[in-house]
Image: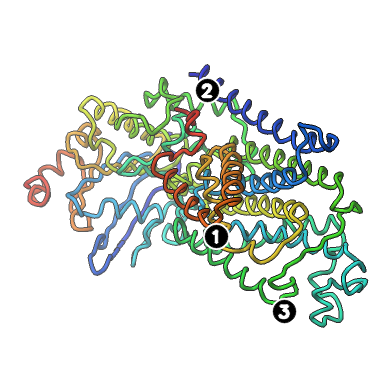
Amino acid sequence: MPGISALRFNLRLGLVVLIFVLLLLPPVLNALPAGHPLRISDFVVAVTGKWICYAILALSIDLAWGYAGILSLGHGAFFALGGYAMGMHLMRMIGNRGVYGHPVLPDFMVFLGYKELPWYWLGFEYFPFAMLMALLVPGALAGLVGWLAFRSRITGVYLSIITQAMTYALMLAFFRNDMGFGGNNGFTDFKDLLGVPLNTPSARAGLYLAALGALLITLLISAYTVHSKFGRLLIAIRDAESRVRFLGYDVTAFKLFVFVLSAMMAGLAGALYVPIVGIINPGEFSPGNSIEAVVWVAFGGRGTLIGAILGAFSVNALKTWLTSFAPDLWLLVLGALFIIVTLFLPRGLIGLGWRRRS
Amino acid sequence: MKKGASLYLDGITVTFDGFRALNNLSLIVEPGELRAVIGPNGAGKTTMMDVITGKTKPDSGTARFGDHDLTRLDETRIANLGIGRKFQKPTMFDALTVFENLELALKAPRGTLAALHWRLSGEARDRIEEVMAETGLMDRAKDRAGILSHGQRQWLEIGMLLMQDPELLLVDEPVAGMTDQETEHTAELLRRIAGKHSVVVVEHDLEFVRALGRKVTVLHEGSVLSEGPIEQVQEDPRVIDVYLGR
């Protein structure tokens, strides 16, 4: 037995190393001179960088759903809030280079007749503050929603509906112009980050490597969490919540902890995503986004961490390929994928290779 | 070797949609005592356990454990007072191994950060192995709880109770579906546990209650019908009428 589990561990570790080595290729091969047969285009680097952010989002969902059984259908909201925090910083960094040339106010505020920056925009000109908010705002929202739900012992489908309503409500709110977040246009036309113009090769490589580093760090944090006694308690809560209570554990505190951690990871993913794609708008809050992210995790194999990462990459690769010639088919394929995985591959892609503890 | 508090129930009434599951129930269990509670289906045995562990709040009556008013505390707090419960249907964590199930039950700080930083000490490992030996699960340590046999699941759950080192163990139908040999093993296990802990066993199986050989409380329609040594209870005409006579 120990031989087999050690082999499984090595297989998994090998897979992780392989994924990260492969993910290092795009920026390296992108640096080759134009015309070189092995050169990877800027487009591929940007798309892969976007998928890395999605993989962090998938990881955060797996932590809450795969381990603690908290099926959030609103994780896209945490992702979008992190994205908006970064977007606010990027808007402030435009300075007087906007269309209206106002030294402080972003274009949309000038257009809407703002005289000064709303109070909640203060501080976002500082990068560390914006990054902190990208983690704290999603964390605080998850803390509030989780606290209300978990202490009332709301679980299962009811919790999923509440989180779905949460992201929908935020989408409607962010669509409003008087919210001060650019309404349906959101933020775009970013110029530079940390003094580096975003359209340069070095910025592209830097953003890509930052996302990859964040994926590695969030994977390590998640792995530490799920392999500790804390992680075994999450599995116990997932499978028999009330039994854990009778053992004397405060189930609400454990669920809240993992839900907030997960929301902060999603917020980080969103913050990295925005400078890579160059835009953030309320569409990121749409309920469909959150559901799609859950499908990535289910497809890759939930409760395995690495499965969530594989799922995010493979489903998005499929989406990019398919929508290039038949965009109307995508939602049908996504739905079919979910049904197929649920019926025939309950352990997802990862279940094809090996199973967790036989 | 007696320790801990006594359990004191007085005048407990619980009503579900007009049905009186418990009707003015009174019961005292002394520290270190092993008490068997028997009664026909619907006599209120499981509801009584629910009241003691905080799952159900009584409409009226007093439930105390030592100085603590159990009717005002939730399940987690009551568990941490030292009242452990084994459910009628064995409930454990099927995806975790026998060892991991016991590790989660082990008496240790229950906070989130404590769980994140938890390292299995040699002492804790010894204690888990001791309980695995006591419950006969030593060679199943690395097997997932989900693949254990019925009897082994019952013992694992009793083992989890022992890991909590509670002052009072509530054991609901531990031998349902067990073979004679397993039943005997379980009776011996519970007799060994009593003394160090108070134990309340709810059971249908009269052979098993006889094998325990201690004081018996007979419940009927939510209240105590008779109480005393098994021989005396068996002679009680009211008991024969409602329970043994059927």
Q: Position of residue A184 (x, y in %)?
A: 68, 71
Q: Is residue B223 left or right of residue B191?
A: left
Task: Specify the label residue A178 is tagged with.
Answer: 3
Q: Nearer the viewer, residue B237 or A184?
A: A184
Say which label, 2 or 3, has the lower sequence index. 2
User: What's the CA distance linking mark 2 and mark 3?
Assistant: 57 Å
Q: Do the residues at discs 2 and 3 belong to one chain?
A: yes
Q: Residue at x 81, y 33 (%)?
A: A36
User: Between tags 1 and 2, which lies in front?
Assistant: 1
Q: Is residue A318 left or right of residue B241?
A: right
Q: Secondary structure at mark 3?
A: helix
Q: Residue at x 48, y 50 (%)?
A: A333
User: What's the CA distance linking mark 3 and mark 1?
Assistant: 25 Å
Task: Specify the label residue A328 is tagged with.
Answer: none
Q: Residue at x 76, y 65 (%)?
A: A187
Q: Position of residue B124 (x, y in %)?
A: 55, 29
Q: Secondary structure at mark 1?
A: helix
Say which label, 3 or 1, has the lower sequence index. 3
Tell me the subunit letter for badge 3.
A
Please indicate, yes or no, whether residue B110 appears anywhere in the rendered image: no
Q: Do the residues at discs 1 and 2 belong to one chain?
A: yes
Q: Amino acid at mark 3?
A: Asp
User: Between tags 3 and 1, which lies in front?
Assistant: 1
Q: Residues within 10 Å of mark 2 (few under 14, many from 20)?
A: few
Q: Position of residue A212 (x, y in %)?
A: 73, 41
Q: Amino acid at mark 1?
A: Gly
**Mark count:** 3
The residue to which callout 2 is attached is A5
Quarter occupied by the N terminus of chain B: top left
Say which label, 1 or 2, has the lower sequence index. 2
The residue to which callout 1 is attached is A288
User: What's the CA distance linking mark 1 and mark 2?
Assistant: 38 Å
